[in-house]
Each structure stands twice: as C-alpha cells, then as structure tokens.
Image (spheres, coloured by chain):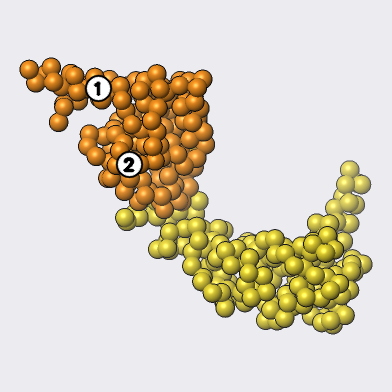
Amino acid sequence: MGKAVDNQEERQTEGVGRPGRPEPDPGIVTTRIRARFGDTSVSTGNAVGCESVIAERDALLPFMTFLRDDPELAFDYLVDVTAVDRLRLDEEVRFAVVYQLYSHKHNRRFSVSVPVPEADPRIGSVVSVWPGANWLEREVYDMYGIVFEGHPDLRRILMPDDFGSYPLRKDYPLHGKGERDNFVF
Amino acid sequence: MTTKVDAVVGWARKNSLWPMPFGTACCAIELMATLASRFDLARFGAEAIRFSPRQSDLLIVSGRVSIKMMPVLKKIYDQMPEPKWVISMGACASSGGVFNTYTLVQGVDQYIPVDVYIPGCPPRPENVIQALMKIQEKVAQAKAN
Ligand code: SF4
C-alpha cells in the first residue's frame, strides 16, 4: 500500500513537466531544445516514456520547424494532432493542442503540447511544416473550435458544414443540442 | 381478371427482388454473410445486389446513419423507382441503437418509410432471411401498378 503511494508521488514528480514542478533529467530532445531556445522558453517532461514539451503558441512555427530540421532531432513525421479540453480540471488555460511527432531517422517519439485559451482559441497552423497536418487540424477545428491560422482550407471535416457546435468540448451535451432532430436537407 | 394479373406480377416480383444495400456499419458484414454461399440469398431470388438505386426495388438499410449521411440515404430512396420496399436492419438503423448521441439519426423511419424492421445487434443472417420473406409476403399482396 505504502509502496503504491510512493510510486504515485514518484510518477507525479517525475512525470509531467509543468512549471513549478521538479523536472526529470533532460533527455536528448530537451537538451537540444534548451541549447537552441534557452532554458526558459519551454518546460519539458517525460510523461509516457517519451519526452514531451509544453510550448508557447506565439513562437510555434519556428519551434516546430526546428524540431523537423535539426539533424539531431529530425522529427520528419507528424503522427497526430489533437486537443484536450481541460474544462473543470485544475488548469489555467482550457485547451491544449497536442502534436505527436516521430523521427524515422532516430526512431524517437516526441510530444508537444500547446496551451490555447478559451477566450482566444487560435493557434498557428503547421501545414507548412508537415503537410499531413492539413486534415488533422481540420478535425481539431471541427471538434474543438480551435482556429488554425494560416491553414489553407480550414473547413469542418467530420460534421456537416452547417453544424453549429464543437462536439468534443466538454460542455457540449452528449445528445447534442437538437441537431439530430432539426437538420434540414 | 385483375386479381389474376396482380397475383402473377406479385409472384414474379417477390421472387426477383433487387436489393440496394445501404451498408454503413457492422450490420453490413452480416448482410454480406447472408448473400454468401452458406446462407445464400439466391434461394429467394434476391442475390443480385447492386449499388444502383435506379435498378432496385428493395432498400436494405444496414448500419448507423448519421445526420450527414441521411440526405444521401434519402436521395437514394428517392431515386429508386416505384414500387419499392425498405428493410431497416439492426438496432442502429431502426432506433439509433446504443448510439444515443448528437450526430446519429435515431431511426431512419423518421425520414423514409420502413416496411420491415430487423431487431438485433447485429441480426443474424437468419433474421435477414426472415425479413426478406416478410417482404416477399408484402410484395405478393401489392397491386400490379
Ligand atoms: S445494430 Fe449493432 S451490428 Fe448493426 S450497425 Fe448497429 S452496432 Fe453495428
């Protein structure tokens, strides 16, 4: 029993690299990012066995381009873009857009999380860095209403074009707001 | 005399149904099994499944229909020439099934007329065959024109 609690504490301190929490030993990706952007620009962690970073949305594009082009990192493959709605969780900023990256060259995974406030749900599009982001960002836009600035074709991808809500937001009811009974065709 | 004509036409129709499958989910897999050799829908003259509403007289809705898909289904139904019949296969097509969610039509019969409902998730091929036989009864009784 006591051991389990210990483990949990360990996981929390080791795990999520939030500001104010002790950080784990920096891995190679973290070290590389620090060398390029300085110590303060990012906070890193090692949550699920791969390194991760919480990045600022303002300087996202240069940051992502660096991750792709740096020969030591070479994250040439954008595996997924998704978002987290942290409504009613103990977080200052409601949304986080999460990018999962993979480097074929180094067989290494990396995860970038970018907080996006509810009042201003905008973030730069990374389509210019990884063209595969196109549909992934459309899906995040469709489900969470986060606008990807600079996206070449930001339309809904799953829901009908005239759908008024963003259904994966946590304050959207499971049964919808009557869309399934009141749609026109 | 007209009853005789009706009977002959009905007999011909019921033994040569041309289903239009509208398979949008897992139920469609059972529908395929129904068509294949073990269950062999050809025994009922309904094996000529074509994705061609203009040549079909039996619409089999097998699977979930979302609010984005419903206009497509409606259009396919409208394209089918009269007379036409509809089977709603499985819980999802008939009532939304377990998917009581924001995007799923809670029963296609809200938008198109359904003749036979098949319960189950998914219904076994035997259920599909029984539904087809029910449709055949209905077809046999229909007026020739
Ligand atoms: S009724 Fe069951 S088997 Fe059929 S489409 Fe729905 S979930 Fe799939």
Amino acid type for the residue under numbered disc 2: Pro
From this view, report whether residue B123 is shown above or below residue A179: above
The numbered mark, 1 or 2, whose residue comes first in the sequence reads 1
Q: Spatial distance from mark 1 to mark 2, Cα to Cα?
A: 20 Å
Asked if residue A174 lies left or right of residue B115, the reply is: right
Determine the residue positioned at 32% across, 56% down: A184
Residue B20 picture location, percent across and down: 37, 37
Q: Which chain is orange?
A: B
Confirm or reject: label 2 Cβ below 8 Å from ligand 1.
Answer: no
Amino acid type for the residue under numbered disc 1: Ala
The residue indicated by pointer 1 is B12
Residue density around tag 1, few if under 14, some if 14–19, many if 20 or more, within 10 Å: some
Confirm or reject: label 1 Cβ below 8 Å from ligand 1.
Answer: no
The residue indicated by pointer 2 is B53
From this view, report whether residue A103 is shown above or below residue B144: below
Residue A148 picture location, percent across and down: 57, 73
SS class, disc 2: helix
